Image (spheres, rainbow, N blue to C red):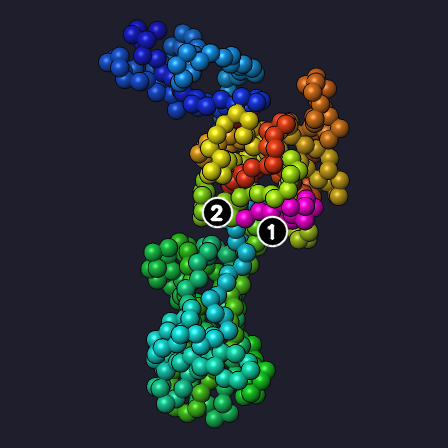
Amino acid sequence: MLITNYDDYLYTIDYTPTNGWRKYHLLFSDFRQEGWGNEAVERDTALRFVNSIQFKFASKINHETNHLFIDDLALIGGNITYSSNALYHRQNTVSMEGYAGMSLVNASFTNAGSSATTIHGWVLSGNVRGEDWGANGGDAVFESWNGAAGAIGQEVGGVVAGSDYKFLVQMSKHASFTGSVYLETVWLTSGSVVIQTNRTADIAPSITTADWPPSSHDTGWVEAPATAAKVRVQIRVAGVTAENVKAHDASVTGSQYADNSWYTTWIPGFSVSHTTNRAEGEYAARFNTTNTDWVAGMYVPPFGTGETVTNFADYTGIAVKARRAPGYAGTGGTHGRIRMSVVTGSTETAKTRWYPVDGSEWEDHVIFSKDNFYTVETADTNDPAALVVWTNDWRAIDRVDIYYGPSTNGATPYDLILDDFRPCSGTYLH
């Protein structure tokens, strides 16, 4: 009532579904005055003197008329809080990042386009050269006649601070080799600023003198320091006065489990890829299918890994961000849909109802509260009174599936993008 010129606080929903219900969470913090009234009133002040809540419905097309249906209106309060690792492998800090191990370019040191300073994928300095010796492929060779010291290294992205990583190398040396050999991990920020360097003790004494097979050497597990986003793995030699030492193959592994370990063979034609069109982090999961079935799905880790982290007893729901893939910008009959499913043992025991996903940009989370998981026998009923809430204690969930497909009576499923999938708590759920 403090606003007397009708410049009320409002929130505009640009698009509404035309083929089903959608739940909207409208935060008071997102309501704005339009500013034309020249009588600004602080939002908190206005909220203390609410006179009415109104719905205004209009089309952006001249003379178009239609109906809008509104149901299940509630005023709620509270916050969403997340556990970043409760469902995905606990070393991961963001979900759906597409982490599938750390790949080195030219891990076998094949001498592709080599020069005194580079071979394909690697940066060289000092006495190291790329050479292809015989049937065993390429080598990084540290030669005494090219100098007493040298290094070969490569930057690898996708590092998560606090997770452990290991640099492994297969090496051999001439029987008369003299000098020291070190394996290094140089931790870098996203802007390639050096944070710290970890170096092994001299591994030269333990490198085999056999021509083949080479011996294996590694840095051991090294924890990525705070703010680390990349690592430069290096082989460095010093004090070489005779003969040579060779590196044949290299790899980087991480204790961070693969965040994209989707189990997808149960639905023919279904696949999941990753895209940089994301809500957070670096990547999001893109769900797509090549068949004409109206539903497909994925298994969420840790199914099949032997590690149980799906204890939801302390959470009140599951949150995920979803949007339609670019190229499917329309609304109405071109909606996609998603739903969650719970498996205990090997049996699917609970499902949510379908939730529409339109052609919007990234928006707020779609939230499936635990009391919206229904027994599989009732989840698809057309009678809301027949729905039976699944009353399991949520302490030993073996798998969570995510289904997706087109809207009711739709055609081939459209691509959907999902991101930021995690358990959540709070009263901001209904």
Q: Which residues are magenta?
A: 261-273
Of badges 1 and 2, nearer the viewer stands 2
Kind of residue indicated by mark 1: Ser
Q: Which mark is residue 275?
A: 2
Front in this rendered view, residue 117 or 127 = 117
Image location of residue 422, percent across then percent down: 55, 39
Quadrant of the frame with the C terminus: top right
Q: Earlier in the sequence, mark 1 or mark 2?
A: 1
Q: Quadrant of residue 54?
A: top left
Q: Is residue 90 magenta?
A: no
Please tell me whether mark 1 sits on a helix, a strand or a loop: loop
Q: Residue furthest left?
A: 38
Image location of residue 348, percent across then percent down: 73, 38
In this picture, residue 85 sits left or right of residue 299: left
Q: Tell me, yes or no, whether the two marked residues, 1 and 2, touch with CB atoms within 8 Å.
A: no
Residue positioned 51% across, 30% down in the render? 358
Q: How many marks?
A: 2
Please tell me whether mark 2 sits on a helix, a strand or a loop: strand
Image location of residue 12, percent across then percent down: 40, 20
Quadrant of the frame with the N terminus: top left
Residue positioned 38% across, 21% down in the render? 31
Q: Quadrant of residue 354?
A: top right
Res 137 visible: yes
Q: Which mark is residue 251?
A: none
Kind of residue indicated by mark 2: Thr
Q: Is residue 269 magenta?
A: yes
In this picture, residue 272 sits left or right of residue 325: right
Res 86 visible: no
